[in-house]
Image (spheres, grey):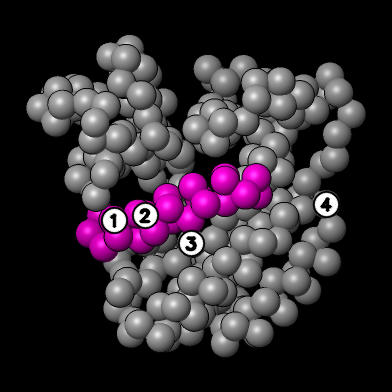
Amino acid sequence: MSGHSKWSTIKRKKASKDAERGKMFTKLIKEITTAARQGGGDESSNTRLRSAILSAKSSNMPQQNIDRAVKKGTGELPGVIYEEKIYEGYGPGGVAILIDVLTDNINRTASDVRHVLSKHNGNLGESGCVAWMFEKKGLIAVNLDDCDEDRLMEIAIDAGVEDVTTEEDVYEITTAPNDFDRVVQSLEDAKIPTASAEVTMVPQSTVAVNEKHAEQVLKLMDALEDNDDIQQVYSNFDL
């Protein structure tokens, strides 16, 4: 798991800013709807839905919005069917870019992705060109002020987590995807609040780039994330 922590910190800060601007709500509603459509509306038996709802709650989405999105997914309310796709490519400095899409018009989104990459000195690659550099993991952040480190470590060890690190103002807990629900439940049972909790893609290692390229990559990612069809953008760059 070496190399991903700095990027996850950047990603968390970006997500916080997006939430402040209200950008996250549209994307979270799409994810909740799709998760409910694929795995049912019971979050206790639907890991993807549970992760999406946790993210929605951490972004202060009203419960009625969450409930409505779930019902659209289960068919209790009319809703749009979204197509999922992963685009892969490269950004400035040769960094890997992984783009997670949920869209109701795949042709439009493909064109948009290609245009943004080209405009920001990146390029779209073939399927599989960078996906092998990433792996799916559960990432849970707990604010330092919300839990004593010794207590958190005890709970984490009992729950079978892969790693616990201290990153600026949070403890970051890494789990295998299949263990994510159990770890989140253990924290809930211990009444330890989570700052964020999601099953996501993390780079297995990072690529060091200079300050100029790092700034360009961040601008590229911001431009991609401005598109409502793009759910998540992942990269393996490091400063």
Tell whether label 1 touches label 2 (CB within 8 Å): yes
Q: What residue type is labelled 2?
A: Ser
Q: What is the C-alpha distance between the residues marked 3 and 2?
A: 9 Å
Above-or-below relation of 35 to 124: above
Measured as percent of width and height from the top left, residue 59 is found at 54, 36
Q: What is the C-alpha distance between the residues marked 4 and 2?
A: 29 Å
Above-or-below relation of 2 to 36: below
Direction left: furthest residue: 150
Query: Horizontally, is 119 left or right of 7 in the view?
Result: right
In the image, residue 219 lies in the stretch drawn in magenta: no
- Which dot, 4 or 2, sits closer to the camera? 2
Tell whether label 4 touches label 3 (CB within 8 Å): no
Q: Classify mark 4: helix, strand or loop.
A: loop
Direction front: furthest residue: 20
| Residue bearing the label numbered 1 | 5
| Residue bearing the label numbered 3 | 234
Specify which label sits upstream in the sequence, 4 or 1: 1
Q: Residue at x 66, y 84 (%)?
A: 119
Q: Classify mark 3: helix, strand or loop.
A: strand
Above-or-below relation of 112 to 56: below
Specify which label sits upstream in the sequence, 4 or 2: 2
Between 204 and 15, the residue placed more toward the observer is: 15
